Image (cartoon, rainbow, N blue to C red):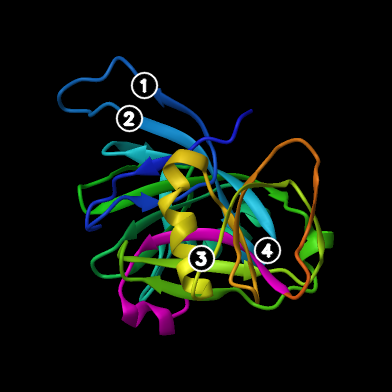
Amino acid sequence: LAFTQMFFIFSGCEALCELKIFQLDSEGVSGHSPEQPKRTSAKAFVHLYRYMEVCKISVIHSGKIENVTSIQIISNVRSINRCLHFCRPWLHQIFYCAVIYTKHNYKCELLKRNTERSITRFVDDESNLIELLNCYPDRQHERRNNPPPMRYYLKQTGEICVLEFYNATQLSSFNPIETLENIENIKSCIYACRLRYFLYLCLAINYTMKKQCTLLRKELEYKIYNVEHRSLFAEILFCEPGTFVNEIFDF
């Protein structure tokens, strides 16, 4: 399975909301009527970094979901990724969880299966419906001593990006794609990586005191990357549209 990009257009976002690290497939359900919209969905993976896991999700676009009931509504949730974090414990307990996330009012609703009666929830243009399917450990031995992730606001792209800095100096699954010279600061290095996301799927940076900025992508085959001496290595866990104010919130 090659690493490819997946972007979803979510209502209420001024730009494309990045939600994944690699794409699987898209699917639809046929046999729908005008009264019952066709369910279309796409599979992807996301970082749930608080659990040090990568999770498989199904994003349901402008359709519906059947046989679910609300568990909880959480307010002031600033990102889709954070909303999915609230879903993770329920997946462990009852083997299913979905979210309805509304960006304009930062509302996160958790859903569970309801087998006792048939209840259909429809997704409007202002909400994002995502099923959390399975979660897998993500290099936990390499990440266990890492500090908490940090948030950076990129004015040029209108994004808040969440980065995890690594203490380990030998890392698996990262492959350098380009090294830039005379990059003024680490935020400029992050921005350079974001500019190259579409072309190279840049997902990590290694920034040195000599102002060198190495951009890296993730590879499925097992490779060891040696972090440069006296440098900072960070993985971009996810980016979502946001403002400077969002830097202070739990994203």
Look at the numbered discs 2 and 1 and tell me whether their residues touch, using CB distance below 8 Å: yes
Residue 124 magenta: no
Distance Cα–Cα, label 4 vs label 3: 27 Å
Q: Residue at x 31, y 70 (%)?
A: 155
Q: Could you say which is closer to the camera, residue 237 or residue 100? A: 237
Q: Distance between the residues labelled 2 and 3?
A: 40 Å
User: Badge 4: few (under 14), some or many (20 or more) residues near its Cα, within 10 Å?
Assistant: some
- Residue beneath label 3, please? 189
Residue 164 falls in which quadrant of the image? bottom right
Q: Where is residue 62 in the image (x, y as percent from the top left)?
A: 26, 39
Identify the residue at the far top of this view. Answer: 31
Indicate which disc residue 39 carries: 2
Disc 4 versus disc 1: nearer the observer: 4
Q: Residue beneath label 4, please?
A: 51
SS class, disc 4: helix
Q: Report the amino acid beneath label 3.
A: Cys
Q: What element carries label 1?
A: loop
Which of the two discs, 2 and 1, labels the residue nearer the N terminus?
1
Q: Which of 216 and 124 is in front in this view?
A: 216
Number of other residues with Cα within 10 Å of mark 3, as a class: few under 14, some 14 to 19, many 20 or more: many
Q: What amino acid type should be assigned to the residue bearing mark 2?
A: Arg
- For the record, the magenta segment spans 231-251
Which disc, if any, is residue 29?
1
Q: Which residue is drawn at 49% across and 56% down?
A: 193
Q: Can residue 117 be seen?
A: no
- Classify 10 Å Cα crowding around label 2: few (below 14), some (14-19), many (20 and above): some
